[in-house]
Amino acid sequence: MTMPQQRRARGSLVDTTRAVLWGFLGVRRQADYQQDIARLHPLHVMAVGVLMAFLFVAGLIFLVNWVVA
């Protein structure tokens, strides 16, 4: 007997970005973390995380160049 597959609710781009930003801060409630695990796709989280890290480094480089100039 096979069990019907449960449909996972997909998280949106905003939900993924919010989860990654909270991860950058290192502050997250356990209940919200568990909800993110159930809802968000790991590849989307990694892609947004790499993009946000790139934007953070680019922002720091821009800030340093602006201050030095």
Image (spheres, rainbow, N blue to C red):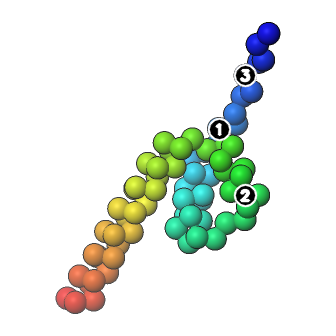
Please tell me which residue is depicted at 58% across the width and 70% down the height of the picture.
Answer: 26
> Is 46 situated above or below 23?
above
Image quadrant holding the C terminus, namely bottom left
Q: Distance between the residues labelled 3 and 1?
A: 15 Å
Tell me the residue that label 2 is attached to. 32
Which residue is identified by label 1?
10
Q: Residue at x 40, y 55 (%)?
A: 50
Q: Name the residue under label 3.
A: 5
Considering every residue shown, the one lying at the far bottom of the view is 68
- The disc labelled 3 sits on which kind of residue? Gln
Name the N-terminal-most of marks 3 and 2. 3
Q: Nearer the viewer, mark 1 or mark 2?
A: 2
- Which numbered mark, 3 or 1, is in the foreground of this view? 3
Contact (Cβ within 8 Å) of mark 3 with mark 2? no
* Pick the front one: 23 or 66: 23
Residue 31: percent from left, percent from top = 76, 58
Under circle 3, the secondary element is loop
